[in-house]
Image (spheres, rainbow, N blue to C red):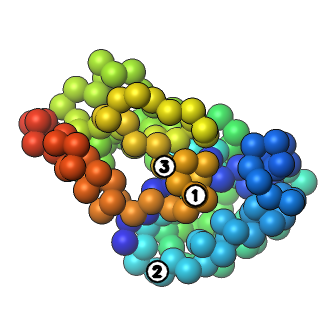
């Protein structure tokens, strides 16, 4: 199974309770860890930015994440720890390019400019939290807009299909 999500903000104390309705950052982070723990070895979790904040508990988070079965493909976001680029304790973590194409969708942390959507169905992104773009070609996978749940890639494709967006684009590399 391929799942997408964004804006975990693990270890980022400001996210709770200012932006998310949790009692503590520990409650918030444990909800995310619990979801990740349910994923299997064959599952791939695409995290499109703002995964892990550089907090005093960074090493504890890495230890917890190292026990996860799933593969993680991460696009670094504006709140991610730069330590992740050199992190060796997470062998299932792959750092992706800041913008890449997957199954004819652009994947990025921030939404890309509409003129850059050329030859793709749309843009799977995070970053906006509660804000929304009024354009069917964008799919926000952040926790804030998805009831703190990861989004199945099949659901994303079905959403684009219902909007009639899967048939209008030529196949690309």
Which is nearer the N-term, disc 2 or disc 1? 2
Q: Residues within 10 Å of mark 2 (few under 14, many from 20)?
A: few
Which is nearer the N-term, disc 3 or disc 1? 3
Which residue: 80% across, 58% down?
A: 22
Counting from the top left corner in percent of width and height, residue 136 is at 32, 35
Label 3 secondary element: loop
> Which residue is at the far top?
115
Residue annotated with mark 3: 141
Q: From this viewpoint, is residue 62 visible?
A: yes
For marks 3 and 1, give the CA distance. 10 Å
Residue annotated with mark 1: 147
Which residue: 31% across, 35% down?
A: 137
Residue annotated with mark 2: 41
Asked if marks 3 and 2 touch (Cβ < 8 Å), the reply is: no
For marks 2 and 1, give the CA distance. 24 Å
Which is nearer the N-term, disc 3 or disc 2? 2
Asked if marks 3 and 1 touch (Cβ < 8 Å), the reply is: no
Label 2 secondary element: loop
Asked if marks 2 and 1 touch (Cβ < 8 Å), the reply is: no
In this view, the mark in front (3 or 1): 1
Q: Residues within 10 Å of mark 1 (few under 14, many from 20)?
A: few
Above or below: residue 41 compared with residue 77: below
Above or below: residue 48 compared with residue 3: above
């Amino acid at each position: 199974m391929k799942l997408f999500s964004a804006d975990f903000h693990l270890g980022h104390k400001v996210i709770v309770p200012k932006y998310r309705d949790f009692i503590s950052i520990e409650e918030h982070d444990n909800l995310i860890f619990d979801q990740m723990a349910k994923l299997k070895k064959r599952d791939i979790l695409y995290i499109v930015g703002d995964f892990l904040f550089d907090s005093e508990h960074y090493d504890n988070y890495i230890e917890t994440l190292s026990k996860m079965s799933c593969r993680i493909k991460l696009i670094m976001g504006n709140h991610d720890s730069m330590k992740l680029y050199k992190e060796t304790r997470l062998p299932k973590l792959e750092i992706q390019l800041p913008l890449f194409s997957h199954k004819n969708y652009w994947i990025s942390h921030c939404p890309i400019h509409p003129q850059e959507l050329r030859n793709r169905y749309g843009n799977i992104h995070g970053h906006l939290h509660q804000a929304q773009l009024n354009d069917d070609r964008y799919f926000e996978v952040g926790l804030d807009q998805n009831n703190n749940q990861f989004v199945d890639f099949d659901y994303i494709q079905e959403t684009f299909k219902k909007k009639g967006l899967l048939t209008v684009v030529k196949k690309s590399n």
